[in-house]
Image (tube, helix red, strand yellow):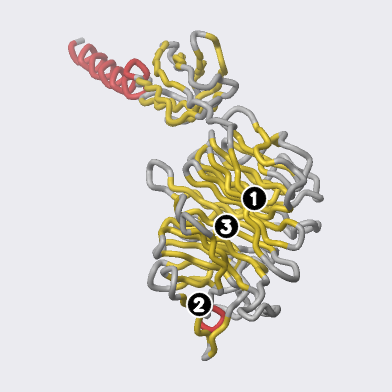
């Protein structure tokens, strides 16, 4: 009898232990709620949970009103909230109901960004004395140091037509100077056509004349990448965090990277023109770099490319479009938002689903910004500004034909042509 009783106790103990091992850990389940980022009208809310069994039900409340309900299947989930008001404090609350019917409530508070002003003044500067002059790109270092590149035809010192175009103009804070950016290339001094410009400081400037050119404002070096890297590279636009981490893109799917010591050709996976590149570094130090790919004004290969930390290129599917008549001319990104433009303006909060933004019906050439509440759009004849909530035309259509633009601090610039002259518009908040 004692033997049977002992066996029963041992079996019960084993079964009890097995049952404990299978019991859910949800009595110790935890969750935290943090607001990772905000714009004027949006918030990105992160739910971090632990020790619960998937799936579980979560409801997000904004100021005690239900905003969205989801089935939670991951320990880290970022929820996107839109239709908020600028410069307003909100209380976000999550209610997580686990499989074990335990209710966990967490809260977090955040204030949305304020909008910026649509009030601008502008100045117009023109260049050129004969033929047809134009400017293709502009870079702002500060209010006393601005560069633009293009083709500017001037007379020589005797008043005769100079057939060799000046390829840059420079603002020193008090006046513009028309310049010929020349350098030694394959044993000869040349003044190449320039298409792009990017500047980190007054003594750290990059030009693109199909090949990269670097200089200190007075002395210039062209990198002959067709000899040293690839004979088919043809570059037109540039972006980087500094001169030891800089990217160049252009025709035929060309992408090149410079780390301050050596050059690398990056395989883009396309032979279509890459019309623009822009990137940023998020709060965790991770780069977000995008390229706009299309044959402008022609049907063909149309997509966004994303370059990761290892210089690998990923194709971003554009689910909003579906009309192959659309083309991309420019791209701009911030920590969370990405915009591209061309035949319309499209924005995304998750780099996946892009929604069309209603600005105007003209073709858009350039988008640049200082932040999600201070974005500038250059179309073929005007400049529009996004203040975080609304778009407004800040330079009227019909005065100039504009091709590119830049923004830094309280200054924005747009460039192109006005009649037969090159033109640059400086806009001030």
- Tag nearer the camera, 3 or 2: 3
The label shown at residue 222 is 2
Is 304 located above or below residue 388 in the figure? Answer: below
Q: Position of residue 132 (x, y in %)?
A: 74, 67
The mark that comes first in sequence, 1 or 3, is 3
Residue count near mark 1 (Cα–Cα under 10 Å), binned few <14, some 14–19, many ≥20: many
Disc 2 on helix, strand or loop?
Answer: strand
Q: Which residue is mark 1?
A: 366
Tags 1 and 3 touching, CB below 8 Å = no
Task: Name the quadrant containing residue 149.
Answer: bottom right
Q: Position of residue 34 (x, y in %)?
A: 40, 25
The label shown at residue 138 is 3
Report, in whole angstroms, how far the alpha carbon at label 3 lies from the one at label 2: 19 Å
The mark that comes first in sequence, 2 or 1, is 2
Which is nearer the eye, 88 or 19?
A: 88
Horizontal arrangement in the rendering, residue 130 relative to residue 143 (left or right):
right
Report, in whole angstroms, how far the alpha carbon at label 1 lies from the one at label 3: 11 Å
Farthest residue in the left direction? 2
Disc 3 on helix, strand or loop?
Answer: strand
Which is nearer the eye, 377 or 65?
A: 377
Residue count near mark 2 (Cα–Cα under 10 Å), binned few <14, some 14–19, many ≥20: many
Farthest residue in the front direction? 158
The mark that comes first in sequence, 3 or 2, is 3
Image point (68%, 55%), residue name? 403
Q: Position of residue 284 (x, y in %)?
A: 38, 43
Is 258 located above or below residue 146 in the figure? Answer: below
């Amino acid at each position: 009898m004692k033997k049977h009783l002992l066996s029963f106790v041992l079996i019960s103990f084993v079964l009890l232990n097995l049952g404990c091992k299978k019991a859910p850990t949800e009595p110790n389940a935890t969750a935290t709620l943090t607001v990772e980022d905000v714009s004027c009208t949006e918030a990105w809310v992160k739910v971090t949970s632990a020790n619960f069994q998937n799936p579980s039900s979560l409801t997000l409340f904004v100021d005690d009103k239900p905003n969205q309900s989801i089935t939670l299947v991951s320990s880290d989930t970022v929820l996107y909230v839109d239709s908020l008001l600028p410069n307003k404090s909100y209380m976000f609350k999550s209610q997580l109901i686990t499989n074990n019917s335990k209710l966990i409530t967490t809260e977090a508070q955040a204030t949305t960004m304020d909008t910026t002003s649509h009030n601008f003044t502008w100045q117009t500067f023109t260049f050129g004395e004969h033929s047809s002059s134009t400017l293709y790109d502009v870079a702002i270092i500060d209010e006393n140091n601005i560069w633009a590149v293009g083709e500017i035809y001037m007379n020589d010192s005797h008043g005769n037509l100079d057939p060799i175009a000046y390829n840059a103009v420079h603002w020193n804070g008090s006046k513009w100077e028309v310049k010929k950016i020349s350098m030694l290339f394959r044993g000869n001094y040349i003044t190449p056509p320039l298409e792009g410009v990017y500047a980190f400081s007054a003594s750290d400037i990059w030009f693109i004349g199909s090949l990269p050119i670097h200089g200190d404002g007075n002395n210039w070096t062209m990198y002959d990448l067709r000899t040293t890297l690839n004979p088919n590279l043809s570059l037109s636009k540039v972006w980087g965090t500094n001169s030891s981490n800089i990217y160049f893109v252009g025709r035929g799917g060309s992408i090149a990277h410079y780390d301050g010591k050596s050059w690398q050709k990056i395989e883009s996976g396309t032979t279509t023109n890459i019309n623009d590149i822009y990137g940023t570094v998020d709060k965790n130090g991770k780069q977000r770099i995008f390229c706009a790919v299309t044959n402008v004004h022609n049907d063909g290969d149309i997509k966004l490319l994303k370059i990761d930390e290892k210089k690998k290129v990923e194709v971003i599917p554009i689910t909003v479009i579906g009309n192959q008549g659309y083309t991309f001319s420019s791209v701009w990104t911030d920590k969370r938002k990405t915009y591209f433009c061309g035949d319309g303006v499209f924005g995304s909060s998750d780099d996946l689903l892009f929604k069309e933004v209603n600005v105007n019906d003209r073709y858009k050439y350039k988008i640049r910004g200082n932040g999600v509440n201070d974005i500038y759009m250059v179309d073929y004849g005007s400049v529009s500004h996004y203040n975080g909530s609304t778009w407004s035309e800040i330079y009227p259509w019909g005065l100039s034909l504009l091709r590119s633009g830049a923004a830094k601090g309280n200054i924005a610039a747009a460039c192109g042509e006005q009649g037969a002259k090159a033109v640059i518009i400086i806009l001030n908040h």
